[in-house]
């Protein structure tokens, strides 16, 4: 028997290998898994429809406004994540129902589903960070931002983000390979994923895990969090200034000698109504992202602190449950963005209603 078959047999044959259970027994793990997978699949269908509509609307609106480019990239990344999560969840569902497949559902879905999903989810995080940072620049340097943030520079930034976040996936592809393996306990040959034993790959793997698996997503999360806090504070200041001006106007009506115009806002608070709506929309997108991405960050921190909290560790089942939970939260996050755009962007609302022929239906009524 070859070395490859020994490794595979030890990881598959229930007489040799006892899966780690951690805190969950078979029944608990099965119930949680089935519930998470079922809900995620339903939400994924909705997310595919909503993100497809987002892309269609923003493409119709055109790319004269740089923000449309980043929002299309965000919707496309969300859509890719949803498609990958559907594939991964389907494999786990079939595995949980003991459906006989010509491939190993867990390992194949890892290489073709959950692994690329993890890298593309980093893309979502960094695009959200870019959108948030762009709004901060519009407030801090409003006169220079139009020269800095153009359609061309935004498109270039999106390409750089995709390369920066997804290029390390090449390591995962090179580190593993597909192979047809015969398993005696199944009495069948099935397609599986086999890791390549190479010292260089192992050393590079540590760098990829730390940089791309921990530092990269946590840094993006921190940028979004800081930018969102800054934008919320700015909006509150602007609201306070508006109230003070309104109060000053009412006093000036009784005291003609005073001029409320002297109480002018700071430079960063002088925004048009269009800019204010855009800032509020970005804050809403960022806030939903923060809520949905927090479980991912917690999971990453735990995987660093506890060595056994991995796919191959003692707490494998807890790791799988947490991983599928992050699929669910980020799928919901990508799916509800259409509601934010519809309620806060009049051009988006008009274009969407036109695509869905809602205005024509109202006229016919």
Image (cartoon, grey):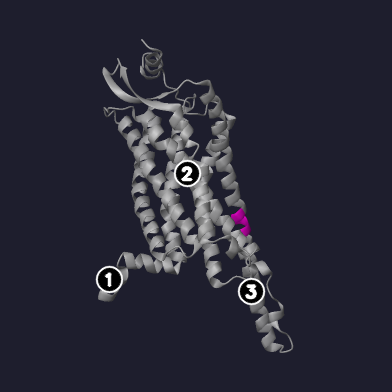
| Residue at figure coordinates x 54%, y 33% from the top left | 208
Q: Is residue 349 above or below residue 126?
A: below
Residue 365 figure quarter: bottom left
Q: Residue furthest right?
A: 257
Q: Is residue 217 left or right of residue 140?
A: left
Residue at x 55% of width, y 39% of height: 298
Mark 1 neighbour class, 10 Å CA radius: few under 14, some 14 to 19, many 20 or more: few
Tell me the magenta residue range: 227-231
Q: Which residue lies at the image location 46% right of the left edge and 39% below the top edge?
A: 118
Q: Which residue is mark 2?
A: 121
Nearer-N-terminus badge (2/3): 2
Q: Which residue is mark 1?
A: 361
**Overall secondary structure of the magenta section:** helix
Marker disc for residue 243: 3
Question: Percent position (x, y) of residue 326?
Answer: 46, 41
C-alpha separation, residue under disc 1 versus residue under disc 2? 38 Å
> Do tag 2 and tag 3 residues touch (Cβ < 8 Å)?
no
Instruction: State the residue in front, 340 or 143.
Output: 143
Q: Residue 133, how many percent across, how many down?
A: 59, 55
Q: Secondary structure at mark 1?
A: helix
Residue 105 in sight in this render: yes
Q: Quadrant of the N terminus?
A: top left
């Amino acid at each position: 028997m070859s070395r490859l078959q020994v490794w595979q047999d030890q990881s598959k044959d229930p007489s040799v290998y006892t899966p780690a259970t951690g805190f969950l027994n078979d029944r608990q793990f099965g119930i949680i898994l089935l519930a998470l997978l079922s809900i995620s699949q339903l939400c994924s269908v909705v997310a595919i429809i909503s993100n497809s509509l987002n892309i269609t609307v923003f493409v119709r609106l055109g790319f004269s406004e740089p923000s449309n480019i980043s929002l299309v990239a965000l919707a496309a990344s969300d859509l890719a994540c949803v498609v990958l999560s559907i594939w991964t969840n389907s494999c786990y569902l079939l595995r949980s129902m003991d459906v006989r497949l010509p491939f190993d559902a867990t390992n194949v879905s890892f290489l073709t589903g959950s692994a690329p999903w993890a890298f593309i989810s980093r893309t979502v995080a960094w695009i959200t960070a870019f959108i948030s940072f762009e709004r901060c620049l519009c407030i801090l340097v409003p006169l220079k931002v139009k020269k800095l943030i153009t359609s061309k520079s935004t498109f270039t930034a999106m390409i750089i983000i995709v390369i920066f976040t997804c290029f390390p996936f090449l390591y995962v592809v090179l580190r593993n390979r597909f192979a047809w393996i015969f398993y005696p306990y199944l009495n069948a040959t099935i397609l599986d994923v086999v890791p390549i034993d190479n010292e260089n790959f192992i050393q590079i793997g540590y760098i990829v895990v730390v940089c791309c698996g921990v530092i990269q997503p946590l840094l993006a999360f921190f940028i979004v969090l800081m930018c969102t806090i800054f934008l919320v504070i700015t909006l509150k200041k602007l609201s306070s200034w508006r109230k003070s001006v309104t109060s000053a106007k009412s006093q000036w009506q009784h005291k003609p000698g005073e001029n409320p115009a002297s109480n002018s806002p700071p430079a960063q608070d002088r925004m048009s109504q269009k800019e204010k709506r855009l800032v509020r929309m970005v804050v809403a997108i960022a806030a939903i992202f923060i809520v949905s991405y927090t479980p991912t960050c917690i999971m990453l921190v735990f995987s660093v602190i506890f060595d056994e909290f991995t796919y191959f560790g003692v707490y494998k089942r807890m790791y799988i449950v947490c991983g599928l939970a992050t699929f669910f939260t980020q799928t919901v996050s990508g799916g509800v963005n259409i509601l934010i755009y519809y309620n806060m962007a009049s051009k988006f609302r008009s274009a969407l209603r036109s695509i869905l022929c809602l205005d024509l239906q109202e006229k016919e009524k």
